[in-house]
Amino acid sequence: MRVEKGQVRAPEIGRVWFNSPPLTFRQLRGRAVLVDFWDYTCVNCIRTLPYVQAWHERYKDKGLTVIGVHTPEFTFAQYESNVERAILEFGLTYPMVLDSNFELWNAFGNRCWPTKYLLDKDGYLRFVHFGEGNYGETERVIQELLREIDSNVSLPSLFVPRRAEDAPGAICYPATPEIYLGNRRGRIGNAGGFREDQIADYSYPEAGSLQENCFYLQGKWASTAEYSEAAEEGEHRIKLRYSAASVNLVMASPRKDVNEVVILQDGKPLSSRQATSDVRFRTKNDCEESYIAVQNARMYFLVNNAGFGEHTLELICPSGLAAFAFTFTSCIDPEQSRKPEPAVPENSLLDRA
């Protein structure tokens, strides 16, 4: 969305900064500014980060300042140490400000993660983009604003897409929407729903009766506003039906250093071609298992099917595992595109930002 020049000026910012001393929009007058609202647990934000980092590297000496505004979706994502760890893991080197109290979010009237705002040399808002995609148009506006600063500036050609599924012609199917596991926003399929703010026994429904767009618990679980936590010793399971190309889950291990979560898709361990950068394999009781070792509170990449399809996912969780939200992606390489079907498709490693 383009904004008419000279109509909307950005608010001032910030307290806690990474990669930079504190900045203000006033001191940045004379430069174009890209403001990126993000959260390190958000898959859509994560997928845009390679582009944002690349624009910083390409244009920082041409008149562009990139500012990442980290506004947390979950309580643990407001802590400086967690955000700093994520910044290092993603290799982000541009200035970053912590917005744990939603001050900047509210000042901008922001509504979603991620959102990108482009400001001109006079501090006026000129362009807004919500969500993923539209990278070519965003970079074109960056270059327009830089030419307003210096009409003779030498600028490179626009980026080619960083991933095949970002290229023109990529196929994006309607995927299962985000599923929260906390009782404030969650959609649980078990009979009787959540036992809010207490530990309770949950049981799967009869085989074949799983509904899409919700999740099911089995075993003893504690239900909180933000997450469901596997309680006490014993076996705990999460199951859901989904339609997507890949699945992610925000998880934490608040009571142990590591929690190992076993992954089954359509009743079987993942294959090596379905594995993501987070998945590991081992042999246990003469059977192969696919699992994820949950340590830091973050989003974990569970499974990546290069093609879109319908599947059943089941997680076997140890006590103390906290699960916050499933997210799903549906855009696939046009070279691999085909109609959705229930059979397990060919797979490739998930491109992690």
Image (cartoon, rainbow, N blue to C red):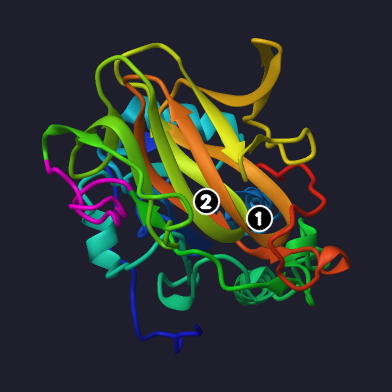
Farthest residue in the bottom direction?
4
Q: CA distance from mark 1 to mark 2?
A: 14 Å
Q: Is residue 339 left or right of residue 149?
A: right
SS label for mark 1: helix
Residue 187 belongs to the span the image colors magenta: yes
Residue at the location (54% across, 45% down)?
Answer: 313
Residue at the location (71% across, 51% down)?
Answer: 305
SS label for mark 2: helix
Farthest residue in the left direction?
197
Q: Is residue 3 left or right of residue 183?
A: right
Q: Are marks 1 and 2 in contact (CB under 8 Å)?
A: no
The boundaries of the magenta stretch are: 181-196
Residue at the location (41% across, 39% down)?
Answer: 238
Task: Name the image quarter holding residue 171.
Answer: bottom right
Tell me, yes or no, if residue 19 can be seen here.
no
Query: Magenta part mainly helix, strand or loop?
Result: loop
Residue identifier under label 2: 43
Q: Residue 107 in the image: x percent, y percent?
A: 24, 64
Marked residue nearer the N-terminal end (1 or 2): 2
Q: How many marks?
A: 2
Residue identifier under label 1: 51
